[in-house]
Amino acid sequence: PRVVILAIVFSLLGVRAGQYIQRAGAIPGNFVAFYVAGRAAAEGHADQLYDIPQEVRTIKGLGIGPEHYHLWMHPAFEALALEWLEPFSYESAARAWAVLMVLIVGVDLWLLRDTSSIGFIVMGTLLWATPGVLDQDIALLILVRVGSLLAFRRGKDATGGVLLALGLFRFHQLLILPVVLLLKRRWKALGSFSAVAASLGAISLAMVGPFI
C-alpha cells in the first residue's frame, strides 16, 4: 500500500536527517550557498549575491572548511525566499532546513499518492536516494512540478503555468517546458508561465542591478 511506502521513505529520510543534523557544523553540499544568499538578501546586500570574493569571505567567517565552499548560482529572486534563515546560526539553519526538506518530501509523496504503484515506488526511492535532497532545493522543485502536473490534469492550465514558473529557481531544468507548452498549444499555461517568469526576472534584476 502507498501509505506503507510513504511511511518507509519518510522514516528512512528521517534517519538520514538525524545523521545530517548531528554533523550540522560540517555539512557538505549546497546549503552553505543558500544560507549566505539568504543572509545577504535579508541584510540588504543582494547586490553581492554574485560577488565571489565576498561570498568566500562570508563562508570563511562561518568556519567552514574550503572543501565545503559552494557559491550562489541560482536566480536572485530565490534568495528572498531564504531570508528566514538569517536570524539563525549556520548550524541551526542547517538543521531547520533538513527538517523542512523531509517534510516537503512527505508532501511530494502525498500529492503523488494516486499515481501508479510502480511510479510511486520509483519516486519514493529517488527522493530517498538523491544525495542532495536534504541540503539542496530539489524537494521544492519536485513540489512545484507535481503541483503543476495536478493542475494540468484538472484542466487548470493557468495555475499549472504559474506553478511551473515558480520552479525557475532551477531554470536550467525547466527550459524545455515552455517549448512543450507551445507545441501542445496550451496557451493559458504558456501565458501565465511567461508572465510569472518575466516578473521573477524583473525582481532578480532589481535586486542585483543590471551589472554583476
Image: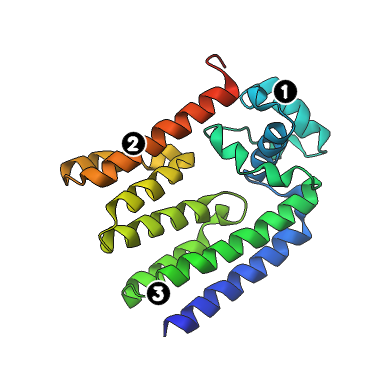
Residue type, numbered disc 2? Ser
User: Left or right: where does residue 153 sit relative to residue 64?
Assistant: left
Residue at the spot 50% in from the left edge and 76% down from the top edge: 6
Q: Quadrant of residue 115?
A: bottom left
* Structural crowding at the residue carrying mark 2, measured as other residues with C-alpha within 10 Å and reported as few (<14), some (14–19) or many (≥20): some
Report the residue marked by disc 1: 54
Separation of marks 3 and 1 at Cα, in angstroms:
44 Å
User: Label 1 amino acid?
Assistant: Gln
Q: Along the polypeptide, which appears first: circle 1 or circle 2? A: 1
Quarter of the picture containing the N terminus is bottom left
Question: How far apart are labels 3 and 2 at the CA level?
Answer: 30 Å
Foreground of the two, 52 or 192:
192
Which tag, 3 or 2, sits closer to the chain's start? Answer: 3
Q: Residue at x 57, y 17 (%)?
A: 212
Asked if one can make out residue 32 in the rendered structure from this viewpoint, the answer is yes
Instruction: Determine which residue is flagged by label 2.
Output: 194
Pick the front one: 49 or 59: 49
As helix, strand or loop, the secondary structure at mark 2 comes to: helix
* Crowd rating for badge 1 (residues with CA inside 10 Å; few <14, some 14–19, many 20+): few
The residue labelled by disc 3 is: 113
> Who is closer to the viewer here, 72 or 108?
108
Q: N-terminal of the two: label 3 or label 1?
A: 1
- Relative height, residue 9 to residue 173 (above, below): below
Q: How far apart in space, not on screen, are marks 1 and 2 (Cα)?
A: 33 Å
Q: Is residue 131 above or below residue 75?
A: below
Q: Position of residue 159 (x, y in %)?
A: 35, 52
